[in-house]
Image (cartoon, rainbow, N blue to C red):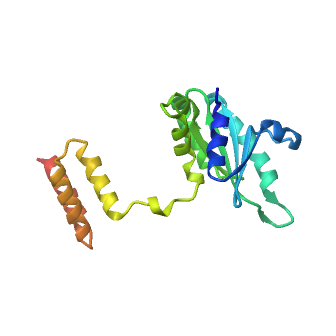
Amino acid sequence: MTTLLDLAAEVMQGHGWNTRLRPDLAHAHLDFELVAESETAIAFFSVVSGHGLRHRADSLAGGIGAVTLQRDAGVKAWEAYLVLIIEDDYPAADAVAQQVQRNLDYCRKIVIDGAGIAAADNPRVDMERALSFLFPLDVALVPTVEDVREYLVELISERGFDKILVAELVTAFDREADCKCWERVKQRSSDKVSE
């Protein structure tokens, strides 16, 4: 059975990162289950319970500072990330997760829904998506303006709006350099509310 950490290591390795799992880290006295390194960044992984999220994040952040801050150089050695994989009820820990992610002391902290990934139809794809912020963008895959417009039209029309009308509005908005279309939409919306 593939664990969440095995899955994360596989995804990181697939993007060219060197990884070390807990047994390799024990001799260095690092309290992480997985460490992944690239030329410019280092990511520390830990599987945590939702109720212990804040305490675990705080205790691991100091260890990251000890590894990444080089006193002699006076600067960070790498961009450091702490990836906390919640193994149980992520929705219950969401508010704490948001607070943890806003705290940038020593490193950037990322909280992901491990239970959701494990329960997904394709856990590898979901883990890849959850960790995608760590990987460089593939320029060939960056959407064009037309792709973004089409996606916007699809997204809005899925909510029950006429697709042709939405496409016309998006096109009209794009043509106006002064963005006055948005002001007219707001005005019309407020007029209808007051009627």
Q: Position of residue 34 (x, y in %)?
A: 73, 41
Which image quarter: residue 185?
bottom left
Between 168 and 146, the residue placed more toward the observer is 146
Q: Position of residue 14 (x, y in %)?
A: 62, 48
Between 178 and 77, the residue placed more toward the observer is 77
| The N terminus - image quarter | top right
Q: Is residue 120 above or below residue 19?
A: above
Between 47 and 74, the residue placed more toward the observer is 47
Q: Position of residue 7 (x, y in %)?
A: 63, 37
Q: Residue furthest right?
A: 27
Q: How many marks?
A: 0
At horizontal 59% and vertical 41% (from top left) the residue drawn is: 111
Q: Position of residue 90 (x, y in %)?
A: 54, 31
At horizontal 31% and vertical 62% (from top left) the residue drawn is: 146
Q: Is residue 33 above or below residue 13?
A: above
Which image quarter: residue 51?
top right
